Image (tube, helix red, strand yellow):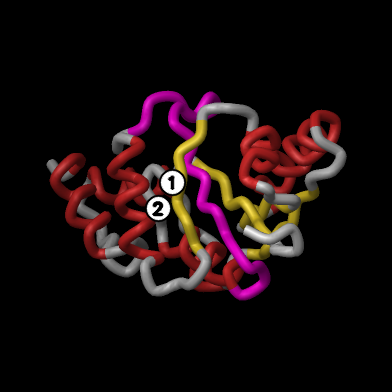
Amino acid sequence: MTSDQRIALCPGSYDPVTNGHLDIIARAAELFDEVIVAVVNLPARKGRTLFSTEERIGFIEQATAHLAGVRVIAFSVLVVDFAREQGAKVIVKGLRAISDFEYEFEMHQLNRLQAPDIDTLYLMASPQYSFISSSGIKELAMFGGAIDELVPERVAARLKEELGR
């Protein structure tokens, strides 16, 4: 890594990764030299995850294998501390709706108090993904809904195994 590399962090629980997440990651990869997809080990806000950290990382690695400069790493510290450890100056987040903005705005302010040297870049969800959420996908899977167009193939298969009735 050279000091002039532009490194961005895309943090999340990714439980599971959706095509909306992958769209944001791919778009970030076009803007930065390196994108680190940071998978939080134990999400404080969402509690226990359906998939293990290792499995979530595997889903993302498989789905982003074609993207140059994308790495997937688990983390268990403040996101700004992890960004510093990785040499990232920017956190990239996707926004779907106003409710996302309200939460992300609060997180941005808290992060800036902790680390004024790290900024946040928000990418608006592409229209075809603006309604997709991991929790919505899990609910659809639980009741046998169509999820194949919303998540990578391997994720859809695992969701059907874990949640299918």
What percent of the width, then of the height, locates residue 31? 67, 72
Magenta residues, start to end? 30-49
Q: Residue at x 56, y 64 (%)?
A: 24
The N terminus is located in which quarter? bottom right
In the rendered image, which quarter is residue 106 located in? top right
What percent of the width, then of the height, locates residue 30? 61, 75
In this picture, is 94 found above or below 115? below
Q: At numbered mark 2, what does the secondary structure look like: helix, strand or loop?
A: loop
Q: Residue at x 80, y 29 (%)?
A: 114
Q: Residue at x 27, y 55 (%)?
A: 155
In the image, 158: left or right of 26? left
Please name the residue that numbered disc 1 is placed on.
Answer: 14
What percent of the width, then of the height, locates residue 139? 33, 44
Q: Are marks 2 and 1 in contact (CB under 8 Å)?
A: yes
Q: Residue at x 49, y 62 (%)?
A: 70
In the image, 1: left or right of 106? left
In this picture, is 6 found above or below 107? below
- In-front residue for pair 18/74: 74
- In-front residue for pair 151/64: 64
Q: At numbered mark 1, what does the secondary structure look like: helix, strand or loop?
A: loop
The C terminus is located in which quarter? top left
Local crowd size for mark 2, using a 10 Å CA cut-off: few (<14), some (14–19), many (≥20): many
Which amino acid type is marked by label 1? Answer: Tyr
- In-front residue for pair 109/116: 116
- Residue 95, can we see it? no
Which amino acid type is marked by label 2? Answer: Val
- Residue 79, can we see it? yes
Please name the residue that numbered disc 2 is placed on.
Answer: 17
Local crowd size for mark 1, using a 10 Å CA cut-off: few (<14), some (14–19), many (≥20): many
In this picture, is 10 found above or below 64? above
